[in-house]
Image (cartoon, rainbow, N blue to C red):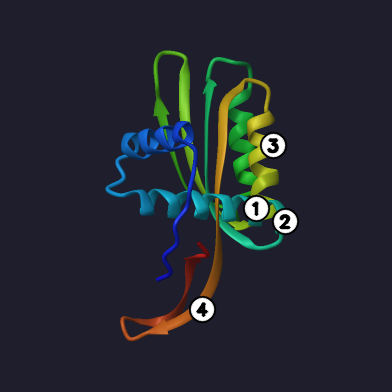
Amino acid sequence: MERFTISMDDQLFEQFDALAHERGYDNRSEAIRDLVREHLETSRLQKDNKGYCIATLSYIYNHHERDLASQVTSAHHHHHDLTLSSMHVHMDHDNCLEVVILRGIIEHVRCFANRVIATNGVRHGKLHIVPIEFAQESHPHSAVPHTHSIPLT
């Protein structure tokens, strides 16, 4: 593990220290590592749209809006190869929250998420992407080779 020292002005340091404490970091090093990982991941995703990812898509919609639930469900069925799992939560009498776990080519996952989020009536949509690599492996615990999804950062 490499060690290095950084300098920052007092105001920036106080803001960083408060953020690290607020997020529950035990030390500044882990907070810095997470910030670097996040920046590297964001930079990689801006450049590489062809690799694989695992992602979460969350969005809220009013289920009373005309045909909205069926439009969203139809979008999921048209992209069934990307969806690993989904959870539907009734927030109140009108609003529903859905969280979907997706896996596939980054470009395809983004296109699907954008389609769902852009559907008229969907609010508070957010996509979180983690780049992965696939590894086909055989293990003694399984007679059938299976795929592992290994996070890249």
**SS at circle 3:** helix
Residue named by callout 4:
136
Residue named by callout 1:
43
Task: Please tell me how crowded label 3 is: few (under 14), some (14-19), or many (20+) other residues with Cα within 10 Å.
Answer: few
Q: Amino acid at mark 3?
A: Arg
Q: Amino acid at mark 4?
A: Gln
Residue appearing at x 51%, y 78% in the figure: 136
Q: How many callouts does the rendering have?
A: 4
> In the rendered view, would you say 36 is above or below 92?
below
Instruction: Measure how far apart labels 3 and 4 are at the Cα level.
Output: 31 Å
Task: Please tell me how crowded label 2 is: few (under 14), some (14-19), or many (20+) other residues with Cα within 10 Å.
Answer: few
Task: Please tell me how crowded label 1 is: few (under 14), some (14-19), or many (20+) other residues with Cα within 10 Å.
Answer: few
In the image, residue 81 lies at what x, y percent?
60, 56
**SS at circle 4:** strand
Task: Please tell me how crowded label 4 is: few (under 14), some (14-19), or many (20+) other residues with Cα within 10 Å.
Answer: few
> In the rendered view, would you say 149 is above or below 79?
below
**SS at circle 2:** helix
Front-most of residues 105 and 3: 3
**Residue lying farthest left?**
26
Q: Amino acid at mark 2?
A: Lys
Q: Amino acid at mark 1?
A: Ser
Pick whichever of labels 4 and 2 is earlier in the sequence: 2
CB atoms at circles 4 and 1 under 8 Å apart? no
Pick whichever of labels 3 and 4 is earlier in the sequence: 3
Q: Is residue 32 left or right of residue 73?
A: left
**SS at circle 1:** helix
Pick whichever of labels 3 and 2 is earlier in the sequence: 2
Picture disc at residue 115: 3
